[in-house]
Amino acid sequence: MFLPQIIGYGVLTLAVLKLIQRRASRKAIALNVAGPEKDHWFKGNLESMFVDGFDRCLKVAADYGGAVKIHGLFGEEWLYVSDPRAFHYILVKEQHIFEENDIFLCCNQLMFGEGLISTLGEQHRKQRKMLNPVFSTSNMRELLPIIQTVSHQLKSVLVANLSDHTSVEFDVLPWLSRSAVDCICEGILGYHSNAIDIGNDNEYIEALRMLGPYISRTILFQRYVPMVMRNLSLYWRKKIVDWLTTSWLPTQTMKDFRELRRIVGVTDSASRIIFQEKKAALGRTGSLTSSQSSLETRGKDIMSIMLKSNASSSEADRLSDAEILGQMNVMIFAGLETTTAAVGRTLYMLAKHPHIQERLRAEINDAVIAYQSSDVYSHANDDSGSVRLSYDALMSLPLLDAVVRETLRLYPSLPVLSRRTTEATSLPLQFPVRSASGDEIGAVPLAENHRLVISIVAANHNKAVWGEDASDWKPERWLNASQGDTPGVKNGVRYTGVYSSMMTFLAGSRSCIGFKFAEMEIKDVLATLLPDIHLALPSEPDENRMVKEIHWGMTGFFAPVVKPPAGDDETPQLPLSMRLVQK
Ligand code: HEM
């Protein structure tokens, strides 16, 4: 064994020992609230709840209420929360007591630099102050044509696979992922990626598409990162990563770790080049037209708006170059898998509910006709002659809005998040729960450094505010809202989410900054595809005479797979049966 190997293993062993020591000390702080028994002596309830654990996550909340004791690793006790008042307390009122956990912050800092998802306190507040206006509705209006170009390219690719009016089944997931890359590159960075054209693939596009999957694969490593970052200098951190990423540890995890390091290197270098180009262009002319940006995107992308706004900010409010670069890396990451899953799930739900699909198609077609005959229509057609709706026309379609809201409610792209307490506190509850000894309690005492799981998915399925049919996909519930029956509000109780009263995009100062961008992207893809493409679930037997049945697994993200025997239950894919709509 060589010296670097011995040091590498030594550091890993120390990290594991320290982790066990920390967990043992936390175990002493018992949580006085009821919850399920451990499923496993070492893994607690983690596997059953968070590895393909959609049903279990909902059942635990339904059985025990909005604050539940669950078991983490080595018997550690975590609080699993979905109560409306507790959410308000954690995310809005006393947000400073409930910070992101160290693992999340340190890993994000290593991978993305000084962006929103790696900063806390004053630095995070300053970054939000600069960035919130960048995502305003008026900027979204300007961005829509960029997104529409991408959606039309997606439609062209899908339509090219269809012939006549017979159904063709194929996996749409890679195309949705490529179109999401283009939306982010064009809309956020102002970089002309054209990922939808496979022949155009380059190292950067490939790295963007692989970033999310490789982060998930290396989850095991992430827990050691805070310890290494806190206890070692930059020099030694780099050395350790160098040693761990040489080929002398030939396990799959190490290979994945090496690949993730390469991917992060590629995305970071590309962000630096794009950033320098934009900065230079701004310095030269005061306007932003980089050589990589397409005609339509010039100066309207989020990065360009951010750079201009930063340059005109006061010195005290201005973000450093490292912080701007960090935002680019963070937004690419935050906006890719989340929107791909949301668009995929919406198409799937429409394939499953043909009547709603038909009604939605009619609504979009009617809106196009009405828009064409309106005063504001500027004959902005694409090559195929289809009409691009204005931002206001797109956002005001009631059924489209209802379908998107209902899908995002039931299947939030980030189903659970993690937080830890920075000081002892008492967490107030809207709906009382049982203590460990069976008494009814209206608040849960929490010690400092206690781990919490914020269950967005359980909150969005909570019958106490969404009604008995909370877990049914019913877009109509949003259409009745105009008759005074606001979804998600019961006897004045509601969640304080930034998007209706659901928690999909969270609440408070760490809520999703890109939610208007995501909503616009999802709606535009639907409004572009549906007039021409009819969707259905697979129904034809394949070459082995098996019909594919899709299952949406929930492990971190939601991802569709095909159930055995037709599929391997593992490879993400979304086979849908499509045909051209008969006009
Ligand atoms: C359906 C799509 C999306 C969903 C469901 C979603 C959801 C969320 C959630 C739940 C958070 C809070 C995470 C946490 O506190 O740990 C978040 C944060 C964030 N999201 Fe999104 N997101 C989506 C799309 C996007 C897009 C398209 C962008 C960028 C254009 C984006 C940018 C961000 C950023 C920068 C943050 C960190 C905010 C902060 O800490 O201040 N998201 N998102």
Image (tube, helix red, strand yellow):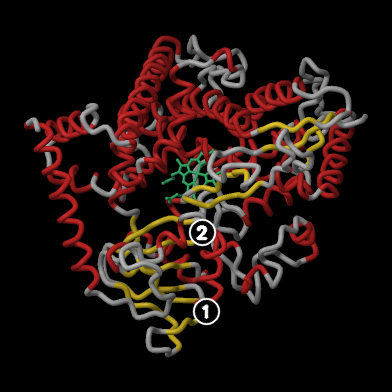
Residue wearing tag 1:
431
Marks 1 and 2 in Cβ contact (< 8 Å): no
Amino acid, disc 1: Phe
410, 464: nearer the viewer? 410
Image coords of residue 281 (percent x, y): 43, 12
Q: Is residue 99 above or below residue 109?
A: below
Question: Circle 2 — which element?
Answer: loop
457, 124: nearer the viewer? 457
294, 463: nearer the viewer? 463
Q: Is residue 226 above or below residue 453?
A: above
Residue wearing tag 2:
53
The N terminus, quarter of image: top left
Q: Is residue 67 above or below residue 145?
A: below
Q: Is residue 211 visible?
A: yes
433, 46: nearer the viewer? 46
Amino acid, disc 2: Gly
Going from the N terminus, do you reach mark 1 or mark 2 first?
A: 2
Image coords of residue 99 (percent x, y): 33, 56
Label 1, label 2: how many angstroms apart (C-alpha)? 24 Å
494 sits to left or right of 78: right
Image coords of residue 393 (percent x, y): 77, 37
Image coords of residue 113 (percent x, y): 31, 34
